[in-house]
Amino acid sequence: CHRYNVQGYPSVEVFNAGSKERNSGEVVDSRDIDSLRRAVIRLVENSSEKPLRWPAMEPIESFDRFNEILNKEKGKNVAVVFEKDDSYLGRELILEMISQ
């Protein structure tokens, strides 16, 4: 706890993937589970150092882009979630699936 300057509980600090610096994390101030989940998802989405196998979590804005993705990923499983703009369900699903 001292190493990362944790001064209270619960404390959540998110680090970019592959981060080796102790002070490079970002503290998440959310206290309820839904706010915490959304805050972590936003941090993952906005991470500047994404690994090569990092999932794409941006929305597909056109049918042409959708077809482009399907053609690129031929032979692979592709999940598509239709949701409202303010929903986090698709991003939660992506993060849950890659952790398996």
Image (cartoon, rainbow, N blue to C red):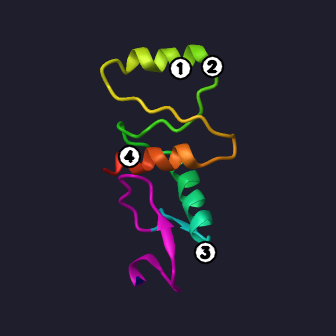
Query: Which callout, 1 or 3, points at the residue further toward the start of the chain?
Result: 3
Which quadrant would the N terminus be assigned to in this image?
bottom left
Determine the CA span between mark 1 and mark 2: 6 Å
Marker count (numbered): 4
Specify the segment rendered in magenta. 2-22
Amino acid type at circle 1 is Phe
- Most prominent secondary structure in the magenta stretch? loop
Judge the density around disc 2: few (<14), some (14-19), many (≥20) Cα neighbours within 10 Å: few
Query: Which callout, 3 or 2, points at the residue further toward the start of the chain?
Result: 3
Picture layout, residue 75 above or below residue 36: above
Query: Which callout, 4 or 3, points at the residue further toward the start of the chain?
Result: 3
Residue 62 appears at what percent x and percent y? 63, 19
Residue position marked by numbered label 2 in the rendering: 62
Determine the CA span between mark 1 and mark 4: 20 Å
Residue position marked by numbered label 4 in the rendering: 97
Judge the density around disc 1: few (<14), some (14-19), many (≥20) Cα neighbours within 10 Å: few
Q: Is 16 covered by the magenta stretch?
A: yes
Residue position marked by numbered label 1 in the rendering: 66
Picture layout, residue 7 above or below residue 94: below
Q: Residue 35 lies in what quarter of the image?
A: bottom right
Viewer-proximal residue, 32 or 11? 32
Determine the CA span between mark 1 and mark 3: 36 Å
Residue position marked by numbered label 3 in the rendering: 31
